[in-house]
């Protein structure tokens, strides 16, 4: 007859069984956490892509609206000849456009000569 123990496992057997259960629980918990994190990352990427597409569509619509507004804008009325303060305002505006770099030196000179003639 062997001298083995019958019934409940001993202290070492119980510790080994507990370690196996705890290790399995930790592995499953880590796997679930990684899976959930992966799903959250995918969802965040999809939302970012959708937001980027929506922003691009809004930018295109805004550019189209600006182009339509510029095309529909009426041409400015010609200035009356000999209007003293109006002539000064136009010369000041030309000077400002030239200083901002919108008009080149040649364009500024031509526009100024046209106004003064």
Image (cartoon, rainbow, N blue to C red):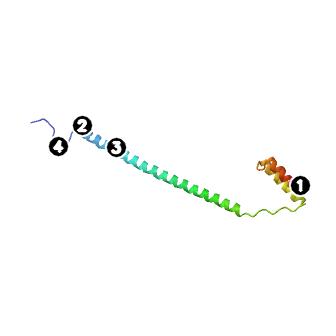
Disc 4 vs disc 3: which is toward the camera?
3
Instruction: Indicate the secondary structure of the residue bearing disc 3.
Output: helix
Q: Residue at x 37, y 46 (%)?
A: 31
Instruction: Looking at the picture, tell me which residue is in the foreground, 52 or 22.
Output: 52
Q: Secondary structure at mark 4?
A: loop
As drawn, the label of residue 12 is: 2
Which residue shows up at 21% across the image and 39% down it?
10
Q: Which mark is residue 116?
A: 1
Disc 4 target residue: 7
At 46% across and 53% down in the image, what residue appears? 43
Number of numbered discs overlaid on the protein picture:
4
Disc 3 or disc 2, which is closer to the eye? 3
In primary-sequence order, the first of circles 2 and 1 is 2
Q: Between tags 1 and 3, which lies in front?
A: 1
- Front-most of residues 21 and 78: 78
75 lies left or right of 21: right
Cα gap from disc 1 to disc 3, whole angstroms: 87 Å
* Pointer 3 residue: 27
């Amino acid at each position: 007859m062997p001298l083995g123990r019958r019934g409940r496992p001993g202290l070492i057997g119980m510790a080994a069984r507990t370690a196996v259960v705890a290790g399995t629980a930790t592995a499953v918990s880590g796997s679930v956490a990684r899976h959930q994190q992966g799903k959250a990352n995918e969802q965040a990427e999809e939302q970012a892509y959708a937001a980027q597409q929506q922003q691009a569509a809004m930018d295109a619509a805004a550019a189209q609206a600006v182009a339509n507004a510029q095309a529909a804008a009426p041409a400015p009325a010609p200035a009356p000849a000999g209007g003293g303060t109006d002539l000064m305002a136009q010369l000041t505006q030309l000077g400002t456009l030239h200083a901002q770099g919108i008009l080149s030196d040649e364009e500024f000179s031509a526009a100024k000569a046209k106004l003064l003639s």
